[in-house]
Image: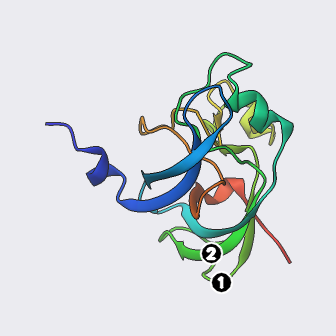
């Protein structure tokens, strides 16, 4: 029997979602995956607005999955880290950009060019490796692999 999304994604989150190409936002409750052993969970403090967010919201590139919680210029404070995380601790100021996943084994990934990886996972509106859809920073919290998180001074 398959696990329910709630079992696989137990972290309650709140964001602002576009539900169609109109560009209107409405409150959206959803679940994020639990903090895994290599993940950093953080409270979102700020999120920039990029024109690519508008392209996604209006499905101008043809692959938006609604509802969409955009935002890929995200800054926050770490609230939890996984057991194998070495670079971050609770209270650290962090940021996440446009990627939250890649294969980490292809030539591009081996040369720190994850944005060219055929299996890259964008911060929002993309299937994650576990089958869930990613949601961005127009939300109250994020969970991301530490490889895609940067520290702010």
Query: Which class describes the residues within 10 Å of circle 2: few (<14), some (14-19), or many (20+)?
Result: many
Query: Which comes before the other along the chain, label 1 or label 2?
Result: 2
Return the residue found at the far left: 1
Position of residue 47 measured from the top left corner of the image (x, y, whole percent) = 76, 58
Visual colour scheme: rainbow
Q: Which residue is drawn at 68% across and 34% down?
A: 23
Return the residue found at the far bottom: 91
Q: Residue at x 58, y 28 (%)?
A: 20
138 on left or right of 115? left
Quarter of the image where the N terminus is located? top left
Q: Is residue 43 above or below residue 61?
A: below
Quarter of the image where the C terminus is located? bottom right
Measured in 3D between alpha carbons, the distance from the residue under mark 1 to the one under mark 2, in whole angstroms, is 5 Å
Find numbered disc 2 in the image and state the secondary structure of the residue it sits on. Answer: strand
Q: Can residue 81 be seen in this view?
A: yes
Q: Which of 70 and 34 is in front in this view?
A: 70
Q: In this view, does 96 lie above or below 109?
A: below
Residue under pointer 1 = 91
Q: Which of 111 and 48 is in front in this view?
A: 48
Q: Disc 1 vs disc 2: Cβ atoms closer than 8 Å?
A: yes
Query: Which class describes the residues within 10 Å of circle 1: few (<14), some (14-19), or many (20+)?
Result: few
Q: Which residue is drawn at 77% across and 28% down?
A: 55
Count of marks, rendered view: 2
Q: In the figure, residue 57 lies in which quadrant?
A: top right
Position of residue 41 measured from the top left corner of the image (x, y, whole percent) = 55, 67
Position of residue 113 measured from the top left corner of the image (x, y, whole percent) = 81, 37
Q: Which mark is residue 134?
A: none
Q: Can residue 36 be seen in this view?
A: no
Position of residue 141 measured from the top left corner of the image (x, y, whole percent) = 57, 64
Residue under pointer 2 = 78
Q: Which residue is drawn at 53% across and 60% down?
A: 38
């Amino acid at each position: 029997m398959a696990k329910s999304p709630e079992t696989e994604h137990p972290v309650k989150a709140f964001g602002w979602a576009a539900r169609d190409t109109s560009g209107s936002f409405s409150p959206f409750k959803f679940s994020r995956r639990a903090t895994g052993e290599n993940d950093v969970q953080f409270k979102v403090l700020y999120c920039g607005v990029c024109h690519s967010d508008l392209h996604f919201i209006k499905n101008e590139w043809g692959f938006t999955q609604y509802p969409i919680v955009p935002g890929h210029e995200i800054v926050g404070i770490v609230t939890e880290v996984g057991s194998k995380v070495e670079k971050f601790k609770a209270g650290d100021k962090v940021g996440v950009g446009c990627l939250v996943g890649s294969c980490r084994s292809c030539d591009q990934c081996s040369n720190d060019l994850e944005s060219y990886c055929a299996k890259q996972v964008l911060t929002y509106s993309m299937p994650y490796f576990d089958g869930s859809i990613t949601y961005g920073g127009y939300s109250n919290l994020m969970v991301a692999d530490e490889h895609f998180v940067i520290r702010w001074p």
